[in-house]
Amino acid sequence: MAKIFCVANQKGGVGKTTTTVNLAAGLAKLKQRVLLVDLDPQGNATMGAGINKAGLAASTYEVMLGTADVAGARQRSESGRFDVLPSNRELAGAEVEMVELDNRERRLKDALAAVDKEYDFVLIDCPPALSLLTLNGLCAANGVIIPMQCEYYALEGLSDLVNTIKKVHANLNPDLKIIGLLRVMFDPRMTLSQQVSAQLEQHFGDKVFKTIIPRNVRLAEAPSYGIPGVTFDPSSKGAQAYIAFGAEMIKRIKKM
């Protein structure tokens, strides 16, 4: 059975999509079967995996509304060697349309159950807001990976997200827990980054992943080519860090 993880943060611009795409590619390099679910109407993870979001016959939108299944809507990222349930702007309309549907918070969970045995990992890229889409991601997941920059405002947003996860755990998904916090876009030359990193380790202990993702130009360039950074430049520090993170994830889930 697949382990399902949300990559979530209510703060935008924290490297959430970069993390989802590159973790998927890193796990694929480590011989894991991976499905990436793009739950963000912007469709950035879809494009980052090399899939044209403008020409989709079926997408996350149809899956959420029950007019398509995951097996029929998924596509293959040839550059990343993982499967993608793609997304585009149509998904924004699903928020309104799902309000009237039964079991609206568990639409994604029910859809993923049909392909559960085909994957080792399912990674869900959530939008940067607490919406019905994000709620579906949290209800479907075994745990949450929180990418965050080591800066003051990131700490402010983190407390809101932790409270949200606690509420979903209490009311909708008793299996949900925080898997870990991933420090991204890290610049060791900045004193503030080191201070915030130390605070995270002190407060969250082993919930902070040992792997640290450095600020890296090659990771930033890769999406414009539709290739995950891990395969765009495998020798770059960013790519190496995401492969190391994939290995750490595999170890961590064995203890779950």
Image (cartoon, rainbow, N blue to C red):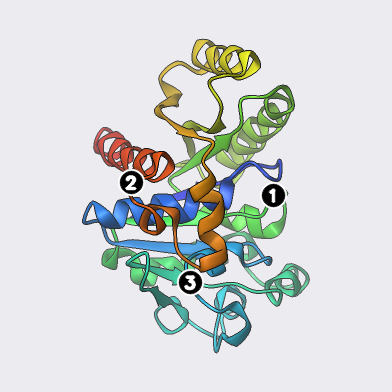
100 vs 51, left or right, is right
**Which residue is at the far right?**
96
Q: Disc 2 to disc 3, how far (Cα)? A: 20 Å
N-terminal label among 1 and 3: 3
Give the label, 1 or 3, closer to the camera: 3
Q: Disc 2 to disc 1, how far (Cα)? A: 30 Å
Q: Disc 1 to disc 3, how far (Cα)? A: 22 Å
Which image quarter is the C terminus in? top left
Quadrant of res 72: bottom left
Residue neighbourhood size for the residue with mark 3, other residues' Cα within 10 Å, grouped as few (<14), some (14–19), many (≥20): many
N-terminal label among 2 and 3: 3
N-terminal label among 2 and 1: 1
Label 3 belongs to which residue? 50
Using the image, tell me which numbered label, if any, was put on residue 33: none
Quadrant of res 247: top left
**Residue type highlighted by circle 2:** Ser
Instruction: Name the residue: 55% across, 38% down.
Output: 147
**Residue type highlighted by circle 3:** Gly
Instruction: Name the residue: 62% across, 13% down.
Output: 191
Q: How many marks?
A: 3
**Residue type highlighted by circle 1:** Pro
Label 1 belongs to which residue? 128
Front one among 252 and 153: 153
Label 2 belongs to which residue? 235
Which image quarter is the N terminus in? bottom left
Residue 101, above or below 116: below
Instruction: Name the residue: 48% across, 71% down.
Output: 50
Residue neighbourhood size for the residue with mark 1, other residues' Cα within 10 Å, grouped as few (<14), some (14–19), many (≥20): some
Q: Secondary structure at mark 3?
A: loop
Q: Secondary structure at mark 1?
A: loop
